Image (spheres, grey):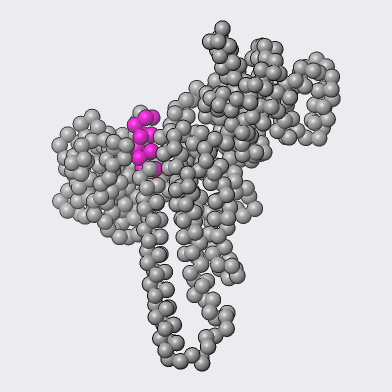
């Protein structure tokens, strides 16, 4: 016996990861080596203690309920088509009921339908709200990551005729950049990035010394929405949708100046005088 | 993409129901890991919710015969790495070199005296002190902390950990060994400083 068991072998031993041959070899060594036996015992104790110490943070009930609601909503949405076909498989209604009974049944059915529609509307709103929160979080993280990494944009140019063509073949949509920018605002460049597994254009602007990220992606809902501003951790988030695009801007600059930039970008999409070619 | 025979399945909404059955029991584990990694409740909640939504949206791409736990933990881990709190991990490029991960056993051994200076009694006392061990765990760099949590708390096999973290099994073994060495060293430092403060 010339070598002690390596830490990896000792750990694999207590984690139950050794193969039959390795285990036999380790046991043979342990039988003749008090040092490794002591180490193995201490590793086992440490593992046992870590199991208990590691279970530290119980999931908050409000989070559990919120996510359980999202999951059950998803299930109920996929159950609706099946439940619609269910009556065919069941026995038919009793034709012996009087007209009063039918009227009551119709009223009950309408009330149930209204209630179901109402509940689904609420659930849809909750899902939309949760998805929106997730989007804002992701966008916000990407903006902070861009600032933190302090890396040059993938395309560096102040010229919109350089930045826009750079995205050709990289994203399945196109967009317009404003010809005239608000004062003290410059285009720094752009990145190709991803949000929710979709390719996204990240335009990088500076307003004074403040950095702005504007994310553009395809609008899957094909519905327009007006400009909506929120705040997150001191950063301002401005969003709007055109028929084709979903746009989210993030920056710590003064909200009115951020609004000027997003307004110019929105105008450019609608094809007015500021639109680029 | 749903296959035609799936649509004719007798149970309503099998995919969504299956997701619910698989994901909900893992929420406590996901949140616990998220909190350990992000170190605060608000970020942990954001991380878990984003993970849950991504998994829900992408569940159709999940291979039914593969490991759901490893799959959803991988989503959590990747989401964490692109989050604000995960940026620190991204930035510590030097950490990988510092860890000297070769996937081999290598020369990594216990720090000199880490075993000899400790008696089984002191070890037992230190390990029984849950707060001391939690404080020691907080000192671990994220790559070592996540591997020890997945191994000990989540009771994942090395193969599952490798799939979750997208690293070779040799690296898993190396990180686990280093994590436990670091924990024992941190406990020993705590014990020494406590003894000195009492003297």
**Residue drawn at the location 53% of the way across and 54% of the way down:** B59
**Residue drawn at the location 36% of the way across and 50% of the way down:** A132
**Residue A147 located within the stretch drawn in magenta:** yes
Which of B136/B38 is in front? B136
Q: Which residues are magenta?
A: A138-149
Residue A175 x, y percent position in the rendering: 28, 50
On screen, residue A110 above or below A189: below
Answer whether residue A16 is visible to the viewer in this image: yes
Left or right of A103? Residue A245 is left
Residue A172 x, y percent position in the rendering: 38, 52
Left or right of A37? Residue A192 is left
| Number of numbered callouts drawn | 0
**Residue drawn at the location 23% of the way across and 51% of the way down:** A227
Which of B127/B105 is in front? B127
Which of B87/A70 is in front? A70
Left or right of B168? Residue A157 is left
On screen, residue B64 above or below B127: below
The quarter of the picture where residue A109 lies is: bottom left
Residue B126 x, y percent position in the rendering: 62, 21
Which of A235/B152 is in front? B152
Principal secondary structure, stretch drawn in magenta: helix
Answer whether residue A191 is visible to the viewer in this image: no
The quarter of the picture where residue B186 lies is: top right
On screen, residue A3 above or below A256: above
Residue A21 x, y percent position in the rendering: 82, 32
Q: Residue furthest top?
A: B199
């Amino acid at each position: 016996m010339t070598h002690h068991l390596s830490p990896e072998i000792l750990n694999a031993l207590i984690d139950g990861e050794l193969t039959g041959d390795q285990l036999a070899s380790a046991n043979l060594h342990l039988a003749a080596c008090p040092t490794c036996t002591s180490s193995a015992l201490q590793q086992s104790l440490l593992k046992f203690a870590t199991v208990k110490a590691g279970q530290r943070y119980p999931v908050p009930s409000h989070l559990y309920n919120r996510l359980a609601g999202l999951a059950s909503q998803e299930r109920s949405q996929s159950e609706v088509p099946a439940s619609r076909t269910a009556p065919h498989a069941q026995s038919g209604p009793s034709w012996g009921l009087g007209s009063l009974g039918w009227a009551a049944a119709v009223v009950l059915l309408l009330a149930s339908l209204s209630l179901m529609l109402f509940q689904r509307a609420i659930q849809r709103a909750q899902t939309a709200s949760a998805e929106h929160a997730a989007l804002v979080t992701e966008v916000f993280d990407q903006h902070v990551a861009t600032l933190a990494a302090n890396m040059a944009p993938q395309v560096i140019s102040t010229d919109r005729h350089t930045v826009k063509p750079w995205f050709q073949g990289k994203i399945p949509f196109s967009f317009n950049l404003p010809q005239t920018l608000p004062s003290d605002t410059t285009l720094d460049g752009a990145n190709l990035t991803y949000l929710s597994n979709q390719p996204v254009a990240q335009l990088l602007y500076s307003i004074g010394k403040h950095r702005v990220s504007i994310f553009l992606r395809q609008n899957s809902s094909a519905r327009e929405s007006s400009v909506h501003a929120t705040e997150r951790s001191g950063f301002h988030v401005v969003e709007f949708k055109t028929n084709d695009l979903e746009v989210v801007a993030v920056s710590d600059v003064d909200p009115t100046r951020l609004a000027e930039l997003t307004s110019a970008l929105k105008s450019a999409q609608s094809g007015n005088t500021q639109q680029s070619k | 993409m749903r296959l035609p025979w799936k649509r004719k399945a007798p149970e309503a909404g099998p995919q969504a129901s299956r997701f619910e059955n698989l994901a909900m029991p893992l929420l406590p584990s996901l949140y616990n890991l998220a909190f350990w990694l992000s170190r605060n409740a608000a970020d942990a909640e954001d991380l878990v919710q984003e993970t849950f939504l991504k998994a829900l949206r992408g569940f159709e791409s999940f291979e039914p015969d593969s490991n759901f736990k490893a799959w959803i933990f991988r989503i959590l881990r990747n989401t964490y790495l692109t989050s604000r709190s995960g940026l620190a991990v991204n930035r510590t490029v030097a950490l990988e070199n510092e860890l000297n991960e070769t996937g081999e056993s290598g020369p990594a051994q216990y720090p000199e005296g880490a075993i000899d200076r400790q008696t089984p009694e002191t070890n037992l006392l230190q390990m029984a002190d849950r707060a001391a061990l939690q404080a020691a765990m907080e000192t671990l760099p994220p790559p070592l902390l996540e591997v020890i949590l997945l191994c000990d708390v989540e009771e994942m096999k090395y193969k599952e950990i490798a799939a979750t973290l997208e690293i070779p099994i040799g690296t898993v073994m190396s990180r686990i060994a280093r994590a436990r060495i670091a924990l024992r060293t941190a406990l020993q430092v705590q014990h020494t400083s406590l003894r000195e403060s009492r003297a």
